[in-house]
Image (cartoon, rainbow, N blue to C red):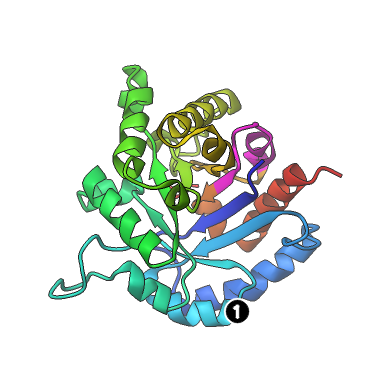
Amino acid sequence: MAKMLVAGNWKCNKLFNEAQLFVDALKTALQNAGDTSQKDQGCDVMIAPPSPYLAAWAQQINGAFKVGAQHCSHVEPGAHTGDFTADMLASCGVDMVILGHSERRADHAETDQHVATQLRHALDAGLRPILCCGESLECRESGAHHDWVQGQITAATADLSAADMSRVDIAYEPIWAIGTGVTASTMQAQEMHAFIRSIIGELHGDELASATRILYGGSCKPSNAAELFACPDVDGGLIGGAALDPVSFAAIVVAAQSTACPT
Ligand code: 13P
């Protein structure tokens, strides 16, 4: 079983001083929620704040959690105003990067090709990417969701070696569940996660597929995290709204830890 990961994606939220205050608030909330030690209980924790905070945030966190970025550009260093590369993130102490989020695909016209290039750059920079995939409601209702997700994963990972792929996490984030309060049912999540694992198996072999971490994202919160994480192919969560509140996020982390190490 892959080590669980609970990753917070803050998106475009919080000012810098709020981000700084969050660190101690989360540590306290984790203790209050029953966290004994994330290292002992086999659960990774990552938070991705807005990019301008990353260097200072990485120093402040000092290894207590993984530091994530929400994006890296597909361009090479040079004349690209406003862009930043995976190497630049790594030089700021970033550990992980979220790639291919549906909001980036929608707001910035990022294509599967862009995502494949970003993934290559992230791996080359030594970052651990979380590759997002997921269908719209229209796509699911038309019955094309499996083909859609398969296309996204294949386009981004088909050219990766097994060694590269062993450093990639996947996040299944159905667009209809993001920020809507409507969560995928455990049956929907498990079914799609098992399908994603089978795609990885076809592309990269069964051993790698069973070791790949597949996160669920989309209105995951303290009230539904434990049942989602109990699904055999759900290896953690990519959390949006609930990651903005230290108490809610801590409860989700503890739910993952309990799943990883039932007592
Ligand atoms: P919510 O948890 O707010 O639905 O967001 C999920 C998400 O998009 C995480 O990347």
Q: Nearer the viewer, residue 31 or 216?
A: 216
Instruction: Look at 54% across and 43% down and name the residue there.
Output: 212
Q: Nearer the viewer, residue 126 or 138?
A: 126
**Looking at the picture, how far across and down is residue 37, in whole percent?**
77, 63
Magenta span contains residue 235: yes
- Most extreme residue toward the right is 263
Instruction: Look at 72% across and 54% down and name the residue there.
Output: 42
Magenta span contains residue 94: no
Tell me the element at label 1: loop
- Most extreme residue toward the left is 79
**Looking at the picture, how far across and down is residue 93, in whole percent?**
47, 76
For mark 1, what is the residue? 62
Image quarter in which the N terminus is found: top right
Image quarter in which the C terminus is found: top right
Is residue 41 shown above or below 23?
Answer: above
Instruction: Look at 52% across and 36% down and name the residue there.
Output: 209
Looking at the image, residue 80 sits to the left or right of residue 123; the answer is left
Which span is picked out in magenta?
223-237
Q: Is residue 205 visible?
A: yes
Q: Nearer the viewer, residue 252 or 248?
A: 252
